[in-house]
Amino acid sequence: MKKYLKYIAVLALGFVACEPEFDNPIDEDNFYTSGSADFSNYVAIGNSLTAGFADGTLYITGQENSYPNIMAQQFALAGGGAFTQPLMNDNVGGLLLGGERIPGFDPRFVLAVDENGNSGPALIGLEPTTEVSNILTGPFNNVGVPGARSFDLLFEGYGNVSNVPLGLANPFYARFASSPNSAVIGEAISQNPSFFTLWIGNNDILGFATSGGTGVDQTGNLDPSTYGGSDITDPAVFAGAYSQMVELLVGTGAQGALINIPDVTSIPFFTTVPFAALSPENPAFGPQIPTLNATYAQLNAAFAFLGVPERSISFATDAASAVVVRDESLTDISAQLTQVLVGGGLDVPTATIFGLQYGQARQATESDLLVLTSSGIIGQLNTDRFAELVGLGVPEATAGELSVNGITFPLEDQWVLTPNEQAAVSAAQTSYNATIQGLAEANGLAFVDARAALQQVASGGVPFNGGVLTSEFVFGGGFSLDGVHPTPRGYAFTANTILNAINSQYGSNIPNVNIGDFGTVTISND
């Protein structure tokens, strides 16, 4: 079946990247003051959001528009000093090790149009030039490390180049770590910062969410060395790591700001693909609806007989229909379903296939979140399932009919974040944020409610001089083409949010920037 779910066509977009201009209309000496804060040596600690990650990778323009760099330029108006960053080698992104591209560390996305006129994110057609083993000489004020979780910042050896091929070190950190065994937090402490920002914890839940909940909720497991990359960090582990970092930073005499964790499920990665993604107007799907409904009729009768009529599957001819998903939280009724289908006259081999395929199946609801990447596979042939069925002796034509993602073959776990999985993410986030706010209050640090700020962007948007910043994918201006990280405009909004909290806590009057002066997505690979 041909792909039918496409990104919305691009019209005349005014979204090209531009150089930022800072909104400082008053130039009188000493007008801006630091209050009780000291911005002379600002150090930013965190993960990809701190580093300036965007469009699926790290690249120079993204780093130059990172919220710490924007803030540092504003701090300079009130005694702030120089701010250095471990810049990438190019605006392509991606990483090399020994001259070879590191798998999973690809170049950036740009907004492109394919041969059929469909627009959407595409990898820029250029090769990376940033070699991880070419270690930069610091120190650097921005020690944001893409991919880092809370406890990773305390790990000695997290920047050891020799451990990168083993998956035991972070290549982004390895290229600027001052020594193979230095910890990220050590890099920050060694600079004796006068002021710091700490934004960490997103990745302690984000990997679980973006993988559709394929990881493990490790709540109750206090040994992070056993965690997988898509697992949820135990709240006690997070609290312990975070408390230790704050203690070390405050112990230097530095002032600072602690930033909480936004609702990761409110970002475009989870809000762009609708649960009802099957349009009867699509020529690859619409004409098949009567046949599909007839095929599902016997299955639906079996669901009703087993007392689970809510699992029935049907497609409308006059409205968009929900995709079919596999929900691991449902009781697996594969064996019972097979028996009922056999009793209804279906042959044993076919009934067995149906039983196994739909034992935990249902149609999606508005409570389900389909991940952004599912748009590329809905309605497509699942080649693995097709091969599996053919291997079982199913004729190729029948195997093909039973292997269409989201229509006849339920979307697998990695494509959908179900309500139960969302609840696990929310519970961890709530605990993390309580820790962050409590430590900010206990130590007299600025507390930044990034969660509330992102909720504004996601629910109606934030007006600025020239438009409204929203979380709509591509068009909203707030998020880059990976659907997770901000655009330069989004980072400028983040910088303003943090600056407002700092001004409130320390009595400073550092001005905001005009977010309209910052670019959004790049619409070509020029």
Image: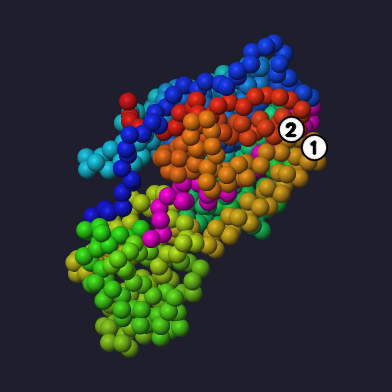
Query: Which image quadrant for residue 70?
Result: top right
Residue 123 lies, in percent from the top left, at 35, 36
Q: Nearer the viewer, residue 288 or 393?
A: 288
**Marks 1 and 2, Cα distance to the nearest angstrom?**
15 Å
Q: Which residue is mark 2?
A: 504
Measuring 46% from the left and 51% from the top, which residue is drawn there?
Answer: 271
- Judging from the image, what secondary structure is the residue with disc 1 in? loop
Q: Mark 2: few, some, or many residues within 10 Å (few <14, many ≥20)?
A: some
Give amino acid for label 2.
Answer: Ser
Q: Which mark is residue 204?
A: none
Q: Mark 1 and mark 2 in contact? Answer it, CB < 8 Å.
A: no
Stretch in magenta: 247-276
Residue 462 lies, in percent from the top left, at 55, 39
Q: Which residue is mark 1?
A: 443
Give amino acid for label 1.
Answer: Asn
Residue 251 lies in the magenta-colored region:
yes
- Judging from the image, what secondary structure is the residue with disc 2 in? helix
- Can the viewer see residue 114? yes
Measuring 33% from the left and 83% from the top, which residue is drawn there?
Answer: 341
Q: Nearer the viewer, mark 1 or mark 2?
A: 2
